[in-house]
Image (cartoon, rainbow, N blue to C red):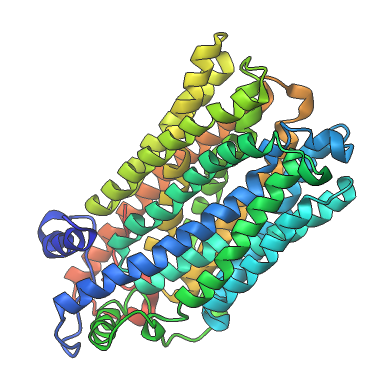
Amino acid sequence: MSTEDKINTLDSEKNTTSTNIAEVPIDDNVAETDHEGEKSAIRKIDRNLIIVFAALYMMSFLDRSNIGNANLTGFSTDLGLKGNEYGAAVSLVYATYVIFEPIWAVSLKMIGPRNVLTGTTICWSALTVGTAFAKNFGHLAAIRVLLGALEAGVIPCINVYLTMTYQRHEYMTRITVVFVASALSGAFGGLLAYGLSQLTAGGLHGWQWMYIVEGLISFCLAPVAWWQIPNSIAEARWLNAREKAAMKVRLERNRHIYDPDEKFSHKAILASFKDPRVYVHAVTHFGIDCTLYSLTTFMPTLVAGLGFTSTVTAQLLTVPVYVIAGVSFAICGTMSDRKKIRSPFLVFALSTCLIGYIILAVAPQVGVRYAGVFIAAIGLYTSTAIHNMWVADNMAGHYKRAFSIGFVCLVGNSSGACIGFIFTAQTKPRYLPGLHFDIGMTLMAMIGVILQSFYCRYLNKKKRETIAAGAPNDPSLGDKNPHYMFFL
């Protein structure tokens, strides 16, 4: 069964099988749906957009986190890094990354997705190539700061764009593809580092060639993004007239989720700040991202610390870990959309992370600790991706949703600035203080998910009582509309 058929099946079952979600009634004035035209349009959108988004996120994530592979191939020695300057370089990218995430998310609609994603891709690709020619910590620090500011536009903008195009129960199926690409970036990065680490051509070392090659690959995505990403689906050159008409009807039907005519308002930003759910999501995401950035940035060094003295062996042993992470997320992400529920999958993912970290921290045997890396990786992308889209699911009003996504990503990604000072060179090879920190953060995230789930359940109960009392459907109220039910 195709993705579109699954989605249509879910649509037909939503009033009989789902007790957690009540969609807003469709306006009688909306034109009749052309199901074949809509299915054809969605297939083309998936094929033309999601694959490009996945490639952009894969390369941006790789260009940001490949410093872990570089560090195994003479990177720190060549740049003369001392003390914890390597850890500081890891963290610096997130100093600007977190600041610019909400800015890019809110400005996406005003500047245009094509302009944002194409322009930033050109810039961070150039910075990646430039890293190969850094001579000292000062050069590296400047590049990492700029890299963070420009790569900050990728994942918040992709998340916001999905909410502008798809229905709520379709988000995870699409973001699954994007985040599986991130898992592939880890595997691809390990293989690429393995191949290039032995290259010394042109007077350049292996880590320098790694940055040059990866930067050039990223740069090739810029014209693809410009050609394939429309500022709105109505402008998509790869949709025919019938498909555009079907999407226009679909967007009208989905207006309670995304209103293309909504204008920017400071009240929308203020509404986000006033919503307690945003802060719970933000703190939870911080805990979740501690796991993500700890493993993706330090996995090569963690694996090397298990007793594999060869850096080549350590790099290759990270590849199957990322494969497991991608497969597990593909399963959980798809099932989350089918069931229209998020929190149980988040609790499962965080539980596997917790078990994996505990094994890494306490087990003396190398083989057992390597198994711990695999177990932790099961929840690696599942937790961060599903939580990102849970925020999008439960915030209404485009600009409130965009800012909330950006703000939650801001707080969550600030964990990347912390881990470079927690997984320090002085704590090699086991990094026990960092592992203990991640155990605590994972427990905190699990508590946040559970609290959020119960609070949303309580709010849905209140909304149903209001509907029973005769409350009208008013999409202008955003997520305060009684007919806008929250995903659990």
Dividing the picture into quadrants, the one containing residue 394 is: bottom left
Can residue 216 be spotted in the picture?
yes
Residue plotted at (46% across, 64% down): 52
Left or right: 237 in relation to 372? left
Residue plotted at (78% across, 50% down): 132
Left or right: 315 in relation to 333? right
Dividing the picture into quadrants, the one containing residue 422 is: top right
- Of residues 159 and 401, the one nearer the viewer is 159
Residue plotted at (54% across, 9% down): 365
Q: Position of residue 336 (x, y in %)?
A: 29, 49
Q: Position of residue 120 (x, y in %)?
A: 64, 68
- Of residues 94 and 453, the one nearer the viewer is 94
Q: Position of residue 27 (x, y in %)?
A: 20, 84
Against 243, residue 349 (above or below) is above
Can residue 350 be spotted in the picture?
no
Residue plotted at (38% across, 42% down): 329
Which image quarter holds the N terminus? bottom left
